[in-house]
Image: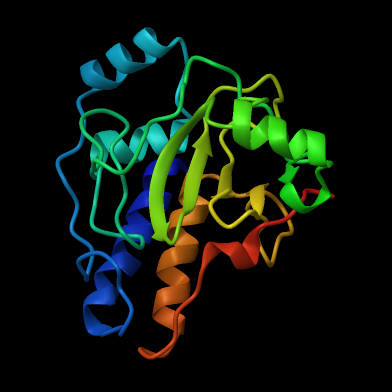
Amino acid sequence: MNIDNRIKSIMQKMEKLSEKHPKYTCGEFPPKWGAPLSEQEVAKFEKEQGIVLPEDYRRFITTVGANGTQPFYGLYSPVGKLPSYETRADVKEKFPFTVRRPLNVYELTEEAYEALYERNEPNVDAGYILLCHEGCGMYSILIVNTEDEETYGTVWYYDLCNDAGVYPLIHPVTKQTMNFLDWLEYYVDKTLELDDEDYFGYAELAGVLE
């Protein structure tokens, strides 16, 4: 299925969310989407940052919406303002981890832990675009600048606030990493599947590509 057809399929399922009344929604529900970015705006952003956005993500933000009220506290736009409590990563700098070598805080030595949290070594906040805040310092991020081909375009679970780490999302069925549309479709499918009293978190998909 090509990207446009897949986006259409996901958005058709997204419309069914209006039939749901989940107790825990975080952002406004059912989802609402902001205006898409123009091709010129995206091209300007890519040129300024020295990157090329993953094709599926680029297509979504130029045809559907650059931001939205879901998943969780809402999809962030790659340009424009973020909420005052959020900070953009340095997209021009390379992401320091790979899908086979993520950041497991529990495995760090005391010296490595101090370097990470006191001196930001390595720079964890590099090479990614913030997708959404799940709450309690947990985020979904999209890797857009990396030296590792496998890692480019993958979505990760980011949780340093709770001393967990930074891990790629692994699809429970395919056991493969997830791109932007995988991430979005999983949100839709899981929300449709769950009872209104239940909820999920992307932490359940965080892992290491074998």
> Where does residue 39 sit, x and y in percent of width and height?
25, 21
> Where does residue 121 sit, x and y in percent of width and height?
67, 25
Q: Quadrant of residue 191?
A: bottom left
Up the image or down, 43 lies above or below 8; here it is: above
- Relative side of 65 to 209, left or right: left
- Relative side of 46 to 165, left or right: left
Specify how the rendered protein is coloured.
Answer: rainbow
Q: Check the image and name the residue furthest to the left.
A: 35
Nearer to the camera, 9 or 14: 14
Nearer to the camera, 87 or 205: 87
Nearer to the camera, 54 or 122: 122
Query: Which residue is located at x 49 percent, y 43 percent?
Result: 141
> Where does residue 81 sit, x and y in percent of width and height?
21, 33
Nearer to the camera, 27 or 31: 27
Query: Which residue is located at x 47 percent, y 15 percent?
Result: 51
Q: Quadrant of residue 79?
A: top left
- Relative side of 92 to 102, left or right: left
Up the image or down, 136 lies above or below 121; here it is: below
Query: Which residue is located at x 75 percent, y 48 percent?
Result: 104
> Where does residue 164 sit, x and y in percent of width and height?
65, 55
**Quick check: can you spot residue 97?**
no
